[in-house]
Image: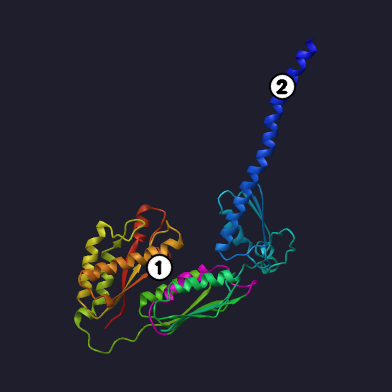
Amino acid sequence: MPGLVRRPLVVWLLAVVAVPVLLTAVLIPARAGTTEDDLRDRTAAALKARGIETNRIDFDGRDARIVVPAGVDEGTVRSIVTGVDGVRSVQIDGGVAAIATGTPTAGVTPTPTAEATTGSTAPAGSGVPGFEVGRTDRAIRVQVPVRSQAVKDALAAEVDGVLGPDREYDDRTTIDPANGLTDATTLSALLRALAIGGGDASVRYDGETVTLSGQVPDQATKATVGRAAAKAVPGAVLADELQLPAPAKTAVSEPCRTFQSRLATFGREYKINFLSGTSIVNEASKPAVVKAAALLKSCGTVRVEIAGHTDDLGSPATSLPLSERRAAAVKAELVRLGVGANRLLPHGYGESFPIATNDTGAGRIANRRAELRVVQGN
């Protein structure tokens, strides 16, 4: 009789222990599978957004293994994937990891680099293929090899954002999976800067030297194009052959003759800043807009660009349209104050040209700005 009582009790205790263990064994793999699928989908989307095609993406928990075509830069892929929330580590197969870093990639036999054999560092602008970006009164021209159709389409979208109503896109891009441009945004700032003004102008990179040639409307635009070219190809030699308009030979009234210097003084003394994330001029800057209108009305023949800028709190995708709305808002207020609309040319530059650090509140306020500069005048 005691044996009959004890056996059900033992069976009951075993059941209590076994059921949670079985449930854990069933549920944990299911949950892990869901997490891996989510990481895989978000990683693929992040790479595709930068124009990078992958052959395979696998996850073991939060550890990624990415297989990319030969020639794709490992550093770029690693930077993108490690930025995906939840990814713990990244292993890259394929690409140019061995050449770029000197560290063997799984399945790839490293090739000695110039640095490994001679001790020299990579040349300035390495990773950026030769290119030419040009503009005329009728078109914007881009000639560059790109890694994939996705990069080609992204570059076309960048150009479309600066074309304006009177220009066409002269697309001379080609697809080169091994040596092409990996990221369309490399040329973003350059395209926006070069779109200012009319006539012929171009920026050409031959692998060593960036040559700037053609016409720009003023010194400010000349400097903007130079900065954008240096940003596109860091460290390259810059040959600046850009030409400014010849001085006007016709008689100029005193207010117009001194307008540019007075505008420069205005820019140093008065700032037009905006509330964060909006195209609303802040209270402290409203008197500056009124003074700008009075200055513009003192010489009715000068055309002025209104350059809108942002801090870096948003993404490049939102910063550019926000900067354009800021420039348009200042134009609308100047027109309301009596300035001719045909004299005002609003352009947005996003977060590309900060004048202060974005690490402080005061610096971000300074970068949320609109600037006035002469485009054409007597």
Q: Which residue is mark 2?
A: 12
Is any atom of residue 213 visible in this view?
A: no
Q: Nearer the viewer, residue 139 or 4?
A: 4
Asked if the stretch drawn in magenta spans residue 210, the answer is no
Is any atom of residue 311 visible in this view?
A: yes
Asked if the stretch drawn in magenta spans residue 181, the answer is yes
Position of residue 302 measured from the top left corner of the image (x, y, whole percent): 26, 79
Nearer to us: label 2 or label 1: 2
For the residue marked with disc 1, what is the amino acid? Answer: Tyr
Give the answer, above or below, for where 132 lies relative to 4. below
- Direction top: furthest residue: 1
For the residue marked with disc 2, what is the amino acid? Answer: Trp
Q: Residue at x 34, y 87 (%)?
A: 246
**Quadrant of residue 17 within the rendered picture:** top right
Q: Which residues are magenta?
A: 176-199
Q: Residue at x 35, y 84 (%)?
A: 245
Proximity of marks 2 and 1: CB atoms separated by less than 8 Å: no
Describe the element under mark 2 as helix, strand or loop.
helix
Q: Nearer the viewer, residue 10 or 203?
A: 10
Position of residue 103 measured from the top left corner of the image (x, y, whole percent): 69, 59
